[in-house]
Image (cartoon, rainbow, N blue to C red):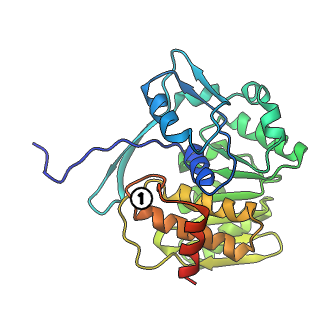
Amino acid sequence: MGRSDEAVSVSVGGVARNVAENLGRLGHPVSLLTVAGNDADWQRIEEASANHIDLTHVARLPGRTTGSYSAVLNPDGEMAVALADMDVYDELSPAFIDSHAAALAGAALIVIDLNCPAETVQHVREIARRNGTPLAVVPVSSPKMDRMPDNLDGVSWFICNRDEAEAYTGITIRDDATWEQAVQLLLKKGAGSAAVTAGPDGVMAGSQGGGVHRCPAVPRVRVEDVTGAGDAFVSGVLHGHLEGRPFDEIIRLGLVNAARTLGSPHTVRPELTKDQLESETEELQ
Protein backbone atom coordinates (compact mmCIF):
# COMPACT_ATOMS: atom_id res chain seq x y z
CA MET A 1 0.00 0.00 0.00
CA GLY A 2 1.38 3.39 -0.96
CA ARG A 3 2.01 6.18 1.51
CA SER A 4 -0.56 8.96 1.70
CA ASP A 5 1.95 11.56 0.53
CA GLU A 6 2.71 9.76 -2.74
CA ALA A 7 1.37 11.37 -5.89
CA VAL A 8 1.54 10.95 -9.65
CA SER A 9 1.37 13.87 -12.05
CA VAL A 10 1.69 14.21 -15.82
CA SER A 11 3.11 17.25 -17.59
CA VAL A 12 4.40 17.99 -21.06
CA GLY A 13 8.11 18.33 -21.60
CA GLY A 14 11.14 17.72 -23.73
CA VAL A 15 14.18 20.00 -23.44
CA ALA A 16 13.69 21.82 -26.75
CA ARG A 17 9.93 22.03 -26.21
CA ASN A 18 10.36 23.42 -22.70
CA VAL A 19 12.82 26.04 -23.95
CA ALA A 20 10.44 26.89 -26.79
CA GLU A 21 7.49 27.40 -24.44
CA ASN A 22 9.56 29.53 -22.07
CA LEU A 23 10.70 31.73 -24.96
CA GLY A 24 7.18 31.91 -26.35
CA ARG A 25 5.86 33.06 -22.98
CA LEU A 26 8.66 35.64 -22.92
CA GLY A 27 7.30 37.13 -26.13
CA HIS A 28 9.50 35.58 -28.81
CA PRO A 29 8.00 33.97 -31.95
CA VAL A 30 9.05 30.31 -31.69
CA SER A 31 8.67 27.31 -34.00
CA LEU A 32 9.28 23.72 -32.93
CA LEU A 33 10.87 21.41 -35.50
CA THR A 34 10.55 17.81 -34.35
CA VAL A 35 8.83 14.46 -34.80
CA ALA A 36 6.16 12.80 -32.67
CA GLY A 37 3.74 9.94 -32.64
CA ASN A 38 0.14 10.41 -33.71
CA ASP A 39 -1.03 9.53 -30.20
CA ALA A 40 -2.59 10.81 -26.99
CA ASP A 41 0.77 11.98 -25.62
CA TRP A 42 1.26 14.25 -28.62
CA GLN A 43 -2.28 15.58 -28.31
CA ARG A 44 -1.53 16.54 -24.71
CA ILE A 45 1.68 18.29 -25.77
CA GLU A 46 -0.11 20.07 -28.60
CA GLU A 47 -2.84 21.36 -26.30
CA ALA A 48 -0.29 22.70 -23.80
CA SER A 49 2.04 24.22 -26.41
CA ALA A 50 -0.06 25.66 -29.22
CA ASN A 51 -0.68 29.05 -27.57
CA HIS A 52 3.05 29.73 -27.28
CA ILE A 53 4.77 27.70 -30.02
CA ASP A 54 4.23 27.36 -33.78
CA LEU A 55 3.79 23.59 -34.28
CA THR A 56 3.39 23.56 -38.06
CA HIS A 57 6.85 22.00 -38.49
CA VAL A 58 6.11 18.97 -36.28
CA ALA A 59 5.80 15.69 -38.21
CA ARG A 60 3.41 13.17 -36.65
CA LEU A 61 4.54 9.68 -37.61
CA PRO A 62 2.02 6.81 -37.74
CA GLY A 63 3.12 3.79 -35.79
CA ARG A 64 5.64 5.73 -33.69
CA THR A 65 5.35 6.71 -30.03
CA THR A 66 5.85 10.29 -28.88
CA GLY A 67 8.98 10.69 -26.78
CA SER A 68 8.32 10.32 -23.07
CA TYR A 69 10.22 10.76 -19.83
CA SER A 70 9.24 9.50 -16.39
CA ALA A 71 10.90 10.72 -13.20
CA VAL A 72 10.55 9.68 -9.56
CA LEU A 73 11.20 12.54 -7.14
CA ASN A 74 12.03 12.25 -3.46
CA PRO A 75 10.14 14.38 -0.90
CA ASP A 76 12.43 17.42 -1.28
CA GLY A 77 11.78 17.58 -5.03
CA GLU A 78 15.11 16.12 -6.15
CA MET A 79 15.18 13.38 -8.79
CA ALA A 80 15.67 9.81 -7.57
CA VAL A 81 15.37 7.88 -10.85
CA ALA A 82 14.26 8.60 -14.41
CA LEU A 83 13.27 6.57 -17.47
CA ALA A 84 13.03 7.79 -21.06
CA ASP A 85 11.65 6.48 -24.36
CA MET A 86 13.13 8.67 -27.09
CA ASP A 87 13.41 6.26 -30.04
CA VAL A 88 11.17 8.42 -32.24
CA TYR A 89 13.89 11.07 -32.43
CA ASP A 90 16.00 8.75 -34.58
CA GLU A 91 13.72 10.03 -37.36
CA LEU A 92 15.22 13.51 -36.96
CA SER A 93 17.63 12.89 -39.81
CA PRO A 94 19.60 15.46 -41.83
CA ALA A 95 17.14 14.82 -44.68
CA PHE A 96 14.22 15.68 -42.42
CA ILE A 97 15.99 18.88 -41.35
CA ASP A 98 16.63 19.80 -45.00
CA SER A 99 12.92 19.44 -45.75
CA HIS A 100 12.38 22.38 -43.38
CA ALA A 101 15.35 24.44 -44.56
CA ALA A 102 13.27 27.58 -45.12
CA ALA A 103 12.24 27.70 -41.46
CA LEU A 104 15.85 27.50 -40.31
CA ALA A 105 17.03 30.06 -42.87
CA GLY A 106 14.78 32.73 -41.40
CA ALA A 107 15.57 32.07 -37.75
CA ALA A 108 17.10 34.66 -35.41
CA LEU A 109 18.40 31.79 -33.26
CA ILE A 110 18.49 28.00 -33.60
CA VAL A 111 18.33 25.83 -30.47
CA ILE A 112 19.06 22.11 -30.67
CA ASP A 113 19.08 19.47 -27.94
CA LEU A 114 20.91 16.16 -27.96
CA ASN A 115 17.88 13.96 -28.43
CA CYS A 116 18.84 14.32 -32.10
CA PRO A 117 21.26 11.84 -33.70
CA ALA A 118 24.91 12.97 -33.80
CA GLU A 119 24.86 13.45 -37.58
CA THR A 120 21.85 15.75 -37.24
CA VAL A 121 23.55 17.88 -34.60
CA GLN A 122 26.52 18.27 -36.94
CA HIS A 123 24.24 19.01 -39.91
CA VAL A 124 22.32 21.71 -38.05
CA ARG A 125 25.59 23.29 -36.96
CA GLU A 126 26.70 23.43 -40.60
CA ILE A 127 23.39 25.04 -41.61
CA ALA A 128 23.72 27.63 -38.86
CA ARG A 129 27.28 28.46 -39.89
CA ARG A 130 26.31 28.71 -43.54
CA ASN A 131 23.38 31.03 -42.77
CA GLY A 132 25.23 33.05 -40.15
CA THR A 133 22.57 32.12 -37.57
CA PRO A 134 23.40 31.97 -33.85
CA LEU A 135 23.18 28.39 -32.56
CA ALA A 136 22.59 27.20 -29.00
CA VAL A 137 23.33 23.57 -28.09
CA VAL A 138 21.65 22.16 -24.99
CA PRO A 139 22.51 18.63 -23.82
CA VAL A 140 19.84 16.34 -22.42
CA SER A 141 21.97 14.05 -20.23
CA SER A 142 25.59 13.05 -19.83
CA PRO A 143 25.17 9.71 -21.70
CA LYS A 144 24.11 11.67 -24.80
CA MET A 145 27.24 13.82 -24.84
CA ASP A 146 28.70 11.41 -27.39
CA ARG A 147 26.40 13.12 -29.90
CA MET A 148 28.38 16.34 -29.56
CA PRO A 149 30.83 17.37 -32.30
CA ASP A 150 34.51 17.29 -31.36
CA ASN A 151 34.70 21.08 -31.44
CA LEU A 152 32.23 23.90 -30.86
CA ASP A 153 33.05 26.11 -33.83
CA GLY A 154 29.84 27.82 -34.91
CA VAL A 155 28.14 27.28 -31.53
CA SER A 156 27.11 30.63 -30.07
CA TRP A 157 25.92 29.21 -26.73
CA PHE A 158 26.79 25.90 -25.11
CA ILE A 159 24.92 25.41 -21.83
CA CYS A 160 25.21 22.23 -19.77
CA ASN A 161 25.33 20.96 -16.21
CA ARG A 162 28.38 19.76 -14.33
CA ASP A 163 27.97 16.05 -15.19
CA GLU A 164 27.58 16.85 -18.90
CA ALA A 165 30.63 19.14 -18.84
CA GLU A 166 32.72 16.41 -17.24
CA ALA A 167 31.59 13.88 -19.86
CA TYR A 168 32.50 16.22 -22.72
CA THR A 169 35.69 17.83 -21.45
CA GLY A 170 37.14 14.91 -19.48
CA ILE A 171 37.75 17.29 -16.57
CA THR A 172 36.57 16.17 -13.13
CA ILE A 173 35.00 19.24 -11.53
CA ARG A 174 36.03 19.20 -7.87
CA ASP A 175 36.24 22.90 -7.05
CA ASP A 176 36.04 26.38 -8.57
CA ALA A 177 39.41 25.99 -10.29
CA THR A 178 38.45 22.83 -12.18
CA TRP A 179 34.97 24.23 -12.82
CA GLU A 180 36.51 27.29 -14.45
CA GLN A 181 38.95 25.08 -16.33
CA ALA A 182 36.02 23.17 -17.88
CA VAL A 183 34.38 26.39 -19.09
CA GLN A 184 37.71 27.63 -20.46
CA LEU A 185 38.06 24.40 -22.43
CA LEU A 186 34.55 24.80 -23.89
CA LEU A 187 35.54 28.28 -25.06
CA LYS A 188 38.85 26.94 -26.41
CA LYS A 189 36.86 24.35 -28.38
CA GLY A 190 35.14 27.26 -30.14
CA ALA A 191 31.96 28.14 -28.24
CA GLY A 192 31.13 31.84 -28.39
CA SER A 193 29.74 31.66 -24.85
CA ALA A 194 29.55 28.75 -22.42
CA ALA A 195 27.87 28.11 -19.09
CA VAL A 196 28.16 25.13 -16.74
CA THR A 197 25.42 24.95 -14.13
CA ALA A 198 25.70 23.34 -10.71
CA GLY A 199 22.31 23.72 -9.03
CA PRO A 200 22.54 25.57 -5.70
CA ASP A 201 26.25 26.27 -6.33
CA GLY A 202 25.31 28.56 -9.20
CA VAL A 203 26.87 28.83 -12.65
CA MET A 204 30.34 29.22 -14.08
CA ALA A 205 30.05 31.14 -17.35
CA GLY A 206 32.22 32.95 -19.83
CA SER A 207 32.52 34.22 -23.37
CA GLN A 208 35.21 34.74 -25.96
CA GLY A 209 37.29 37.71 -24.86
CA GLY A 210 35.15 38.27 -21.76
CA GLY A 211 36.70 35.99 -19.17
CA VAL A 212 35.07 33.34 -17.01
CA HIS A 213 33.18 34.12 -13.80
CA ARG A 214 31.21 32.22 -11.17
CA CYS A 215 27.66 33.52 -10.72
CA PRO A 216 25.90 32.55 -7.46
CA ALA A 217 22.49 30.93 -7.49
CA VAL A 218 19.47 32.84 -6.25
CA PRO A 219 19.46 32.40 -2.44
CA ARG A 220 16.74 30.84 -0.27
CA VAL A 221 14.91 29.06 -3.07
CA ARG A 222 12.01 26.81 -2.11
CA VAL A 223 12.19 23.65 -4.23
CA GLU A 224 8.86 22.26 -5.36
CA ASP A 225 10.14 20.26 -8.36
CA VAL A 226 13.54 20.29 -10.09
CA THR A 227 12.02 19.27 -13.44
CA GLY A 228 12.37 22.06 -15.99
CA ALA A 229 14.69 24.28 -13.94
CA GLY A 230 17.66 23.70 -16.23
CA ASP A 231 15.52 24.43 -19.28
CA ALA A 232 14.29 27.60 -17.57
CA PHE A 233 17.90 28.71 -17.06
CA VAL A 234 18.66 28.12 -20.74
CA SER A 235 15.53 30.05 -21.71
CA GLY A 236 16.35 33.05 -19.54
CA VAL A 237 19.85 33.14 -21.01
CA LEU A 238 18.62 32.93 -24.59
CA HIS A 239 15.96 35.55 -23.89
CA GLY A 240 18.72 37.88 -22.69
CA HIS A 241 20.79 37.04 -25.77
CA LEU A 242 17.90 37.81 -28.12
CA GLU A 243 17.31 41.08 -26.26
CA GLY A 244 20.96 42.08 -26.68
CA ARG A 245 21.61 42.31 -22.93
CA PRO A 246 25.08 42.49 -21.33
CA PHE A 247 26.60 39.11 -20.48
CA ASP A 248 26.21 39.34 -16.69
CA GLU A 249 22.55 40.34 -17.09
CA ILE A 250 21.97 37.45 -19.49
CA ILE A 251 23.20 34.96 -16.89
CA ARG A 252 21.18 36.61 -14.14
CA LEU A 253 17.97 36.32 -16.18
CA GLY A 254 18.67 32.59 -16.51
CA LEU A 255 19.34 32.14 -12.81
CA VAL A 256 16.16 33.96 -11.80
CA ASN A 257 13.98 32.02 -14.23
CA ALA A 258 15.49 28.75 -12.97
CA ALA A 259 14.93 29.70 -9.33
CA ARG A 260 11.31 30.65 -9.87
CA THR A 261 10.71 27.43 -11.82
CA LEU A 262 12.17 25.36 -8.97
CA GLY A 263 9.46 26.81 -6.75
CA SER A 264 6.69 25.91 -9.20
CA PRO A 265 4.98 22.52 -9.59
CA HIS A 266 4.97 23.18 -13.35
CA THR A 267 7.77 22.30 -15.79
CA VAL A 268 7.22 25.70 -17.41
CA ARG A 269 5.63 28.15 -14.97
CA PRO A 270 2.37 29.50 -16.36
CA GLU A 271 2.80 32.98 -14.88
CA LEU A 272 5.97 33.63 -16.89
CA THR A 273 6.01 36.76 -19.06
CA LYS A 274 8.75 39.15 -20.09
CA ASP A 275 7.55 41.77 -17.61
CA GLN A 276 7.31 39.17 -14.83
CA LEU A 277 10.90 37.99 -15.36
CA GLU A 278 12.17 41.56 -15.59
CA SER A 279 10.44 42.43 -12.32
CA GLU A 280 11.77 39.32 -10.55
CA THR A 281 15.30 40.05 -11.75
CA GLU A 282 15.16 43.68 -10.63
CA GLU A 283 13.98 42.63 -7.16
CA LEU A 284 17.17 40.58 -6.67
CA GLN A 285 19.59 43.33 -7.66
- Identify which residue, 200 or 119, lies in the foreground: 200
Q: Quadrant of the C terminus?
A: bottom right
Position of 60 relative to 86 (above/below): above
In the figure, residue 26 lies in which quadrant? bottom right
Q: Is residue 85 visible?
A: no
Q: Is residue 113 visible?
A: yes
Position of 102 relative to 241 (above/below): above
* Amino acid type at mark 1: Val
Residue drawn where x is 51% and y is 64% of the image? 258
Label count reads 1
Residue drawn where x is 57% and y is 19% of the image? 61
- Identify which residue, 120 or 142, lies in the foreground: 120
In the displayed structure image, the side of residue 251 where residue 124 appears, left or right? right
**x and y percent of residue 36 in the render?**
55, 27
In the figure, residue 253 lies in which quadrant? bottom right
Residue drawn where x is 59% and y is 39% of the image? 115
Position of 16 relative to 182 (above/below): above
Residue drawn where x is 77% and y is 25% of the image? 99
- Identify which residue, 17 or 86, lies in the foreground: 17
In the displayed structure image, the side of residue 223 where residue 59 appears, left or right? right
In the displayed structure image, the side of residue 190 where residue 6 appears, left or right? left
Q: Which residue is mark 1?
A: 226
- Identify which residue, 115 or 45, lies in the foreground: 45
The single residue placed furthest to the bottom in the displayed view is 285
Count residues near mark 1 (Cα–Cα under 10 Å), then give few for <14, some for 14-19, many for 20+: many
**x and y percent of residue 21 in the render?**
57, 48
**x and y percent of residue 153 in the render?**
82, 53
**x and y percent of residue 276 in the render?**
55, 67
Q: Quadrant of the N terminus?
A: top left
Give the structural element (helix, strand or loop) at label 1.
loop
The single residue placed furthest to the left in the displayed view is 1
